[in-house]
């Protein structure tokens, strides 16, 4: 099983979600199922079907989170080499001379581009890993190849 890179905050967020799903959400879905079963014909009961689907989703998410957390590798500040883009680094990039954008490189499980967190497995993340500030790097993306300049690595 390969490691999943997570920040301390990302690990805690996923652990909290797992706890919520195991305790509150499971009980909520079980109550919905119980109420739907008492609602009459199960064959024609849309609420029962919806509750069964939600139960399957919740159980699948619980398994997924358990696997992620079991294989998690917490990104420590001491793990980062100075000036080198690694998982956990915050980088400022400029794409083809455009405005600078700031991103934190995280594992896929906690990536959220809207929050400025990009995965080390994404095209940009993969391309800039192990590079330094001042370097220009080619990014191979599904839409084609483009260049980014690494302005700053924190």
Image (cartoon, rainbow, N blue to C red):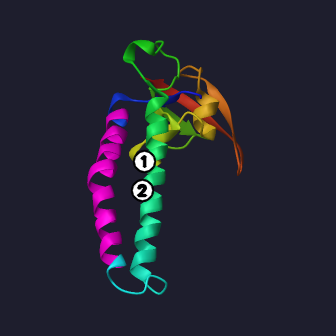
Answer yes or no: do the residues labelled 2 and 1 have beta carbons within 8 Å?
yes
Instruction: Name the side, left or right, on which 125 lies relative to 88.
Output: right
Residue nearer the viewer, 138 or 105: 105
Q: Is residue 111 left or right of residue 144?
A: left
Residue 121: image quadrant is top right
12 is within the stretch colored magenta:
yes
Q: Going by the image, does 77 lie left or right of 105?
A: left
- Residue most extreme to the left: 24
Residue designated by label 1: 62
Disc 1, SS = helix
What's the CA distance linking mark 2 and mark 1? 6 Å
Q: Which residues are magenta?
A: 11-36
Look at 44% across and 53% down and name the residue there: 59
| Residue at the disc numbered 2 | 58
Q: Nearer the viewer, residue 49 or 122?
A: 49
Place residue 130 in its image quadrant. top right
- Which class describes the residues within 10 Å of circle 2: few (<14), some (14-19), or many (20+)? some
């Amino acid at each position: 099983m390969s490691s999943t890179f997570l920040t301390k905050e990302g690990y805690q967020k996923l652990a909290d979600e797992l706890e919520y799903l195991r305790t509150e959400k499971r009980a909520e879905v079980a109550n919905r199922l119980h109420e739907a079963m008492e609602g009459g014909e199960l064959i024609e009961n849309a609420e029962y079907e919806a509750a069964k689907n939600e139960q399957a989703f919740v159980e699948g998410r619980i398994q997924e989170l358990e696997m992620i957390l079991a294989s998690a590798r917490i990104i420590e500040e001491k793990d980062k080499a100075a000036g080198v883009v690694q998982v956990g680094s915050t980088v400022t990039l400029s794409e083809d001379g455009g405005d600078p954008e700031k991103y934190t490189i995280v594992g896929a499980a906690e990536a959220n581009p809207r929050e400025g967190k990009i995965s080390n497995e994404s095209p940009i993340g993969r391309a800039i890993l192990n590079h330094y500030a001042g370097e220009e790097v080619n990014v191979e993306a599904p839409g084609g190849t483009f260049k980014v300049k690494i302005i700053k690595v924190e």
